[in-house]
Every structure is written in C-alpha cells, then in structure tokens.
C-alpha cells in the first residue's frame, strides 16, 4: 500500500469514527485540529485502524504518535 | 423448507451479537435516519437499527443518531422505551463502553441515562459526603471491580484459613457498599464478578494453592455470589461470560496498560448488551414466552411429508441427538418459568401425532401452553398466541429455522424477538442462551410452577367451553380459594417481580424495587395486600398486589393495584376489594381513593374502579394529565358478588 492509499483509507476511518465525512487529513493534522479527537476517541481510532488495516499496534508504538503523518508511517511500516 | 445459505466467515467483533440479523446497508440507513427532522423520530430509527448486528463503531454512530439527552423522558416513553437511570461505580475505565451500552439499551427497549463515578472513587462516592450522583438518583447501580482492586496482600504460602478469612473480609466490605448504595439511592444494585486477568503462576497446579491469583479470584467470586444471593443483589457475571467466550475476545492487555480499560472497546456491544439485559429484567422487560416452530426446529425433516417414522429425532443420529438436546433446553426454560408455545405450518393432527406418539420426543404436550399448527401466516398465529395467553406480543420470542419465516415475522411484528439461528441444530440452544431474552431479576417457587399453570389455564379454558354453559357456573366450578394477607418478607421477591412486569391489569404501572416495597410494608399507616389464588386445577401462586398509603382526612390512596393476567376474568378483583376494605377499616380509614394512570397497555382496567362502585372525583391539583380519580366511602361499601372463598391472613 502506498502512503497515499493509506492516507485515503485512514481518512475513511476518521469519517467513520467521528461520523463526519467532511474531515480531511494531512501529515500535520493533530488532535488540535479535530474537535472531537480526545483520549477516548483516540483509542477508537486506533482500534478502527487496526480493524481496517488488519494490523496490531504495540504498546510502544502508541506512545510515539504525534500527528497523522506518524500514524501513516507506523501503518506503512507494519504493512511493509 | 430448509433453505439455508452459506454465510461468509465473520470478523470476531461482528460475530458478537450473532442472534441479531445483519442489516443490508447500515451506513445508508444511518445517513437516511440522520435527515429525519424530529429528535424523537431519530430515536425511533436508532432503536430500530440497534436491533441489527453492529460493531463498536456502528454503535457509536447509532448512539449519536439517538442523542437520548435531547429527548425528554415522557417522549421516550411514548416511543415504547423505558427511561432508566444507571450509575456505574468502577475500579477501571468504563466511559468507552457508554455509546454501545446506550445502544444495547435501545435494543432492549430501555432509554439509559448513564453516569459514572470518578475513576476509582467508588468507596468515597458511596461512603462520603454527597456527590452529583445523589442528585442523579440512580435506579440501578453497577459496582464494577477488577482483579487489580482485589489484591489481598497474602503471601503465596498462606494457609486455607488465612485465605478464607481475608476473602470473607473483602466480601463483607463489598456487601457494606451494596447496602450503602441501596440506602443512599434506593437503587437496585448489580455486582460485576471479578474477571481473572492474572496469568497463572502455577499452571495446572494454580487451583491447589489457596493464595495463588487464579484460586483467589475464584474464591472471591464464590463469596460475592453467595453474598449477592443473601442481599438480593443482582450479578453482571462477566467472569462466567469471559470464561465461556475466552479472554482474547474480551480483554486487551494493551488497552489495560494504556487506559485501564478492562473490557476492550471491541467487546463494547456485547458488554453493553449483557448489562442492558440485566437492566431490562429489573424494568420488567424480559421476554416471557418462547414460541417454537416444529419442522427442522424441534426435529429434522417435515412431519407432514416424512411421517412419524421419517423425522430425525433422538438416538440413532448426531442430528437426532442434537434436536433432542435442543428440546431438552427448551423444556428446562419451561421449568424455570418461561412459557412455551408452538407455532407451526402443519396439519394439526400431524403435529400432535409427533408429540403424542414419537418415542424420542422430549417436550410433552402438557408443557406447551399454546399449540398452534395450521396454514395461517405465522404473524397472525403469533398474535393469537399472545392473546390466548393474555400476554403482550412484545413478550414473545419466536424460534424458526426458516430465514424467510423469520424475516416475515420481523417485518410484520417488529416487537417479537426473532433470533438468527446457526446453520447447525447443534448450536440452537447455545444461540438462544446467548441472546439473553429471558434474563431474570428473581427466581421464585412461583416461576418454577408457571409453565404448569399456563398449561392448566388451557384446561380451564376448555372447561369453560365444555362443562359450563354459563359464566357463573364455570366460576363456581373452579372452586376458587383466595388467600389475602399483608405482604411479608417471604413475598418480597415475587411482589417486586410483579410490580415490575405487570403491564395490563395494572392501575398505575408504578415500578418499585424490593427496597421501596419493603418501606411501604414497614410503614404502619399503609396497607399492603398480596393475594394467592388456588382452584380445583391447582395453585396459581401469588397473583395480585395492592399498596395503599394514607392520603389525609381518613382516606387511603391506592398507589398500586395489579394482577397477573393468568387469573383475569374470574372476579378476583371483587374479592380483593372486600379484603382491602376490611384491612382499610381496621386501620381506621373512612374512604379509599383509586387512581387510574393510562398507558399503552392497561386499557383493560380503565373502568376498574367504576365497576367496583367507586365514584369519580375531580383530580387533585398537580395530578398528571389523563389520570382519573375515584373514591369509595367505606360506610357505603356493599360487597360485590364473586365466587371465591376468602381466607385472610393476619392483617
């Protein structure tokens, strides 16, 4: 999967988790940019992404996520 | 008849609510429902979608669609939902489960209003100064504790007696918390059992070391269950559920370390449903009657085509054993008080022949309270069954192997629960159990007799049709004996159960917890009455309840008057009034005041007080809309005619 394809699929995950189809993502998008993105919905996002991409994140990988770009990179590495 | 398609393998999280049908396009349905203009319409749509299989993400979206906060309780009741305030006191994170819990509530006809005590503060909240929860006044309190919270600090080599004592101390502490929760909020308490999250230290030897973590959890749970039995506390038995399903399905150690979530978000819909069905049982919304199809449901093959010798049932084949096993499970449900009925497309003679003549039949005709075998459509037959048994259509569960029949019944009668069945009969019983339709909030000797009583009722009906030409003759022929007495502690469980599930013969439909009824019972100025009825066919058990409280100026107001449907039309209410008047006079009362609060289901008692000779009176100031008020001066009371001998207990 290319970075762009991952970003597109991740965007759909965000739409589903936040029930909002108007969300657009960039590498620099952070929780600051999305009103409903809090510690609770963060876990929803991770679980939804795990289901979507068929991957499992390690405890240590979760601590390093700062923005959407990091998120995409972790998924990219796992799918490689 | 038996067309079953091969289903694609399901992701584990989607197999969780396996008894619910899959929606063809949930996303499109959600999008359409979001465009509905009225909040109440959106709640109705959300409640419908909650009846389809959904994962935690879909639950989140259905919850947002419902937005229950925005709809006042009266309107929710109008939608057929029962508003219930539930507080969760937990030693782990539970907030992530709320959306799925509310959606599970909708699926069980509840509008849940949820609050959570601050993380890990359950003791302070219950024992300390008032918090927001006191104001919230929960009707149900869940105490959700986990293994980490039950570290007893025992050395591994601690002996049997030392371990026993430490466990008993901890259980007593929890018991004290339950009592506090009852006193503080007047709530029904639910205790979550302790999930064994500790990896075994000793392997197979774990159970042989009294202080090993696994052995401790087991002992704690045994202690909690026993204490709960003694205290009338209900269980959310997560420990058993996790043991059955496997820890991998329920727990996620990453999320435990990340956010102290005991139950993983993935399992939120199932957890929500487990709790919602307990709450529904407390609210009297559990199903009452199991309606069974025959061909390919209770036996393999089609009796009309294959004949008595051709159907697959009992010893001789794996499938036959499995059908007999399913019959046994249904029979056991009957024995715990679920009413059994049959609804089958068959010639009645063929269907009856299988029951009467097949040597491997496990279920017997006399266990079936309503037996309908004909070629009319099943929706119409289900309506008839409910009418015959005098129960609501919404208390039926319909089990049929044929997906087409299931779909038709769901479409025609959305209030009937129709579980999806696995392709193999070997899984029928487990699926029915898993669906949790018959969750109990009490189990009394009366429940164990219920199946028999409904079957006897069928006999009584036949008696009324054949042996007596007139109603009076029939009623006399029943030789009814009524035992009327004040409610005693031994009656509490059954009385509470009746107040919470009686919908039709119920003048005010006020639901009470055991604690609330005990308060009325102990109040010397109030009058309570519990009525048992026996007749020549057998004992009907405890079938009616009255609670009356002083209303000033020598009047007693009848707060609650209800009666089980199985004794309708037999003049019991007339005999009861006689006992009530006597008890009221003994308290020095001069008048009785009755109130009728109409609901969607209690139309049959709208003229109850008029029929008993009460005079209409103007509603007192502040009375709710639609309620009617009635008054009976005791000195003008004339005992109405009935055909029941009255035995009165100590009043």
Image (cartoon, coloured by chain):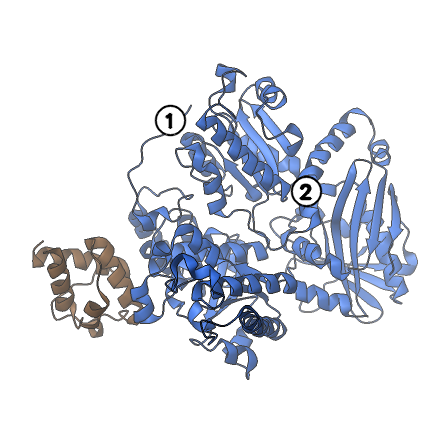
As drawn, the label of residue B450 is: 2
Q: A58 or B205: which is nearer to us?
A: B205
Mark closest to the chain's N terminus, 2 or 1:
1
- The residue under the point 82% across, 66% down is B555
Does residue B255 appear left or right of residue B281 in this picture?
Answer: left
Does residue B415 appear left or right of residue B464 in this picture?
Answer: left
Q: Position of residue A40 (x, y in %)?
A: 31, 69
Q: Residues within 10 Å of mark 1 (few under 14, many from 20)?
A: few
- Up the image or down, A67 lies above or below B497; here it is below
The reply to the same-chain question for discs 2 and 1 is yes
User: Is residue B145 in sight in this rendering?
Assistant: yes
Q: Quadrant of residue A65?
A: bottom left
Label 2: chain letter: B
Q: Position of residue B444 (x, y in %)?
A: 68, 51
Q: Where is the N terminus of chain B found, in terms of image quarters?
A: top left
- Which chain shows up in blue? B
Mark pair 2, 1: CA separation: 36 Å
As drawn, the label of residue B3 is: 1
Q: Residues within 10 Å of mark 2 (few under 14, many from 20)?
A: many
Label 1: chain letter: B
Residue that protrudes farthest toward the bottom in the picture: B129
Q: B32 or B366: which is nearer to us?
A: B366
Q: Position of residue A71 (x, y in %)?
A: 16, 65
SS at circle 1? loop
- Which chain shows up in brown? A
SS at circle 2? helix
- The residue under the point 56% across, 35% down is B328
Q: B355 or B227: which is nearer to us?
A: B227
């Amino acid at each position: 999967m290319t970075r762009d394809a991952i970003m597109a699929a991740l965007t759909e995950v965000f739409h589903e988790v936040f029930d909002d189809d108007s969300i657009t993502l960039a590498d620099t998008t952070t929780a600051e940019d999305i009103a409903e993105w809090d510690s609770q919905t963060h876990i929803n996002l991770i679980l939804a992404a795990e289901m979507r991409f068929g991957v499992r994140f390690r405890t240590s990988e979760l601590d390093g996520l700062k923005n959407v770009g990091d998120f995409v990179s972790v998924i990219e590495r796992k799918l490689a | 008849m038996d067309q079953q398609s091969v289903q694609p393998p399901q992701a584990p999280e989607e197999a969780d609510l396996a008894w619910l049908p899959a929606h063809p396009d949930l996303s499109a349905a959600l999008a359409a429902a979001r465009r509905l203009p009225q909040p109440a319409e959106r709640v109705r749509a959300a409640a419908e979608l909650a009846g389809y299989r959904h994962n935690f993400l879909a639950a989140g979206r259905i919850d947002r669609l419902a937005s229950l906060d925005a709809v006042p309780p009266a309107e929710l009741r109008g939608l057929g939902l029962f508003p219930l305030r539930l507080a969760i006191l937990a030693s782990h994170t539970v907030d992530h489960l709320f959306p799925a819990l509310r959606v599970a509530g909708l699926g069980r006809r509840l509008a849940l209003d949820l609050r959570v005590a601050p993380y890990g503060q359950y003791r302070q909240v219950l024992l300390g100064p008032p918090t927001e929860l006191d104001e919230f006044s929960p009707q149900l309190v869940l105490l959700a504790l986990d293994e980490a919270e039950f570290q007893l600090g025992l050395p591994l080599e601690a002996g049997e007696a030392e371990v026993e004592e430490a466990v008993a101390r901890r259980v007593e502490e929890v018991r004290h918390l339950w009592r506090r929760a009852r006193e503080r909020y007047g709530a029904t308490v639910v205790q979550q059992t302790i999930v064994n999250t500790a990896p075994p230290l000793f392997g197979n030897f774990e159970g042989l070391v009294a202080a090993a973590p696994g052995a401790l959890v087991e002992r704690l749970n045994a202690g909690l269950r026993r204490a709960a039995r003694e205290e009338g506390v209900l269980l959310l038995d997560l420990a058993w559920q996790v043991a059955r399903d496997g820890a991998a399905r329920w727990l996620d150690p990453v999320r435990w370390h990340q956010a102290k979530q005991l139950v993983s978000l993935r399992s939120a819909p199932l957890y929500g449903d487990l709790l919602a069905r307990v709450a529904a049982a407390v609210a009297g919304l559990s199903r009452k009657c199991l309606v069974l199809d025959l061909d390919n449901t209770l036996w393999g093959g089609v009796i009309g085509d294959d004949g008595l010798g051709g159907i697959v049932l009992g010893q001789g084949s794996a499938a036959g054993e499995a059908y007999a096993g399913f019959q046994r499970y249904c029979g056991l449900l009957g024995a715990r008080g679920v009413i059994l009925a049959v609804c089958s497309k068959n010639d009645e003679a063929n269907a009856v022949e299988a029951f009467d003549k097949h040597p491997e039949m496990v279920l017997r005709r006399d266990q079936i309270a309503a037996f309908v075998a004909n070629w009319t459509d099943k929706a119409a037959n289900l309506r008839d069954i409910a009418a015959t048994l005098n129960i609501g259509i919404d208390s039926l569960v319909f089990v049929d192997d044929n997906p087409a029949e299931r779909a038709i019944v769901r479409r025609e009668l959305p209030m009937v629960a129709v579980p999806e069945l696995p392709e193999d009969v070997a899984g029928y019983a487990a699926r029915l159990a898993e669906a949790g339709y018959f969750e109990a909030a009490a189990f009394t000797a009366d429940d164990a007799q219920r199946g028999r009583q409904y079957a006897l009722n069928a006999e009584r009906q036949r008696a009324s049709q054949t042996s007596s030409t007139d109603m009076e003759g029939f009623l006399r022929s029943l030789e009814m004996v009524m035992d009327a007495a004040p409610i005693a502690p031994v009656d509490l469980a059954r009385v509470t159960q009746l107040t919470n599930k009686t919908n039709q013969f119920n003048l005010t439909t006020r639901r009470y917890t055991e604690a609330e009824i005990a308060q009325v019972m102990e109040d010397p100025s109030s009058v309570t009455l519990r009525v048992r009825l026996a007749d020549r066919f057998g004992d009907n058990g405890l079938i009616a309840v009255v609670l009356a409280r002083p209303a000033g100026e020598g009047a007693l107001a009848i707060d609650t008057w209800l009666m089980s449907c199985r004794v309708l039309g037999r003049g019991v209410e007339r005999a009861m009034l006689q006992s009530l008047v006597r008890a009221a006079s003994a308290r020095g009362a001069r008048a009785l005041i009755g109130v009728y609060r109409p609901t969607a289901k209690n139309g049959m008692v709208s003229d109850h007080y008029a029929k008993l000779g009460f005079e209409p009176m103007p509603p007192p100031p502040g009375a709710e809309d639609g309620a009617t008020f009635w008054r009976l001066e005791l000195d003008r009371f004339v005992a109405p005619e009935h055909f029941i001998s009255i035995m009165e207990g100590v009043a």
